[in-house]
Amino acid sequence: MASLSSGSARESKAGFWKKNTSVPGRPGWPVKKDDKGKSGKRDPFHDFENKTSDAWDDGDDDLIQMASLKMSLRDVQTSAKVVLDNHSKRANSQQQQHPVRGSSSANSVHTDESSSSAQQQSHPPTQPSPPHHHPSGPGLGVRLNSGGYQPPKMTSIRYVTNKTPDREAARMEKFKAVFTEPSLDLTELRKLCWSGIPKSVRPTAWKILSGYLPTAADRRQETLERKRKEYFSYIDQYYETRYQDQHEETFRQIHIDIPRMNPLIPIFQQLIVQEIFERILFIWAIRHPASGYVQGINDLVTPFFVVFLSEYIENDIEVENCDLGQLPQSTRNLIEADSFWCMSKLLDGIQDNYTFAQPGIQMKINALSELIKRIDAPLHAHLERHDVQFLQFSFRWMNNLLMREIPLRCTIRLWDTYQAELNGFADFHLYVCAAFLKRFSEDALRENDFQGILMLLQNLPTLHWRDKEISELLAEAFKLKYMFADAPRHLLHKS
């Protein structure tokens, strides 16, 4: 088995790419200067894609680069004066053309790169919205508002005990009964898992529901041992090629993206964890050349890693900075291999989201627009009236399966149901996104300009969500699926 130590290897990577940190386009994708169809018209999806190297995570790059950027006071003052002068001119022009009672806020608008490029293309100044104060979402807003955020002090690992909370005892018995059947009934397991899985049995349930483990109880241990050995044979065979010309760009992009994942969850800033993710993503990328590595895939490892880690430790990963170096290497290897295989199974069902031009995402965004038009016509008309395209906010929802919109604990609960649904990640996710948008319909309708709407939809107030909110969201999504999944019209404009 290849050595998995860090040390000098990490330092060599930094030097290896120091000369070039720019990302011309999506890893492994041809860079096209002018992507036009046969008709000569621009494809808005490709246009959006070419102008945004990281549409779901703009802000992370800026913050990381600004931390080490040296700027003179004169440069800062000059730039600030230009921005303020331009803002004053626009505000005065707007007031002359459209007088408004009261005064508007002059706060700077922080949006993703996707929204700023869209504004530059086609949006003249509009009448500003009255300031609405939304609680911060889990994404860009929290990072910007966190100011002098410091990770909590390192804590010791608390290993799992077999004690079951009384409130879960009855459900646990049902799960154990299903697991111990010689040939597990998948339909029964899905019914149990749809409304949430107790933490202690979630790792086993996810492995079975994802197709990683067989339903036959007597074959599970043998399958685990074989697949874990197979994963590390890939590490031995391929991982040393990561600096070769054909794989250099792929690994460099992975190396850049990993530190930006979940920046406020301390364990993901630990070097030992980042290297686990690098190996998982690199091996997956070279075994799937049709898509290769695409930004956003890195997020999809996270729930599996956290769930399989919970099989061994009781620490609350969202808030505790527990030292995973205290875990035995053999245990970390098991978590790594299991995370790789389950992520691979997930991506097998949604790989058209990540192949060239991402046709799966294009279809889902169009389907979401059509569905919202059916279930919330006023909201759909409001977005159209202010030139807000679904692509500008829901690309990230589809690409990252809402992981950047809700806290990690909520993602794990959501994935309980996705795993329990047939094609949950591919099909049911559309109805969850529709229910998610509809939930904030009134907030969006109160915003009366492009910037205000997009700012809200890219930073929704979900920071304090728990299982209750996810359960409500899933209930609404199930209702939409029941009403519209077989309807002949709501998905007409898929492409």
Image (cartoon, helix red, strand yellow):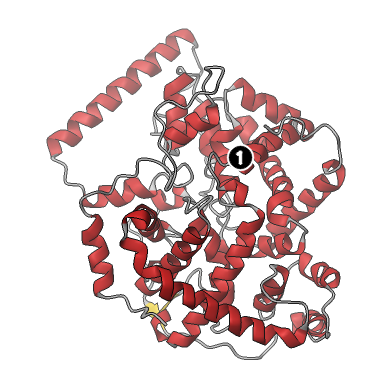
Q: Secondary structure at mark 1?
A: helix
Q: How many marks?
A: 1
Q: Is residue 106 left or right of residue 449?
A: left
Q: Is residue 266 visible?
A: no
Note whether residue 284 is visible. Answer: yes
128 to 22, vertically: above or below: above
* Image coordinates for residue 451, horizontal then vertical, percent: 49, 30
Quadrant of the drawing holding the N terminus: bottom left
Q: Is residue 397 left or right of residue 278?
A: right
Quadrant of the frame with the C terminus = top right
Q: Where's residue 400, x and y in %?
A: 56, 51
**Percent position of residue 86, x then y:** 31, 21
Q: Quadrant of residue 174?
A: bottom right
Q: Of residues 313 and 368, which is closer to you in this image?
A: 368
Residue found 64% across the figure and 31% down from its top: 445
Q: Quadrant of residue 113?
A: top left
Looking at the rendering, which quadrant does residue 395 occupy? top right
Query: Is the residue marked by circle 1 packed among few (<14), some (14-19), or many (20+) residues within 10 Å?
Result: some
For the point 55% across and 20% down, the residue is 38
**Residue that protrudes farthest toward the bottom in the picture:** 162
Q: Position of residue 355 (x, y in %)?
A: 55, 46
Tell me which residue sits at (16%, 34%) in the image.
75
Q: Which residue is mark 1?
A: 359
Nearer to me, 408 or 88: 408
User: Is 14 placed above or below 92 here?
Assistant: below
Q: Nearer the viewer, residue 348 or 86?
A: 348
Q: Amino acid at mark 1?
A: Pro
Query: Where 31 sits versus 320, above or below?
Result: above
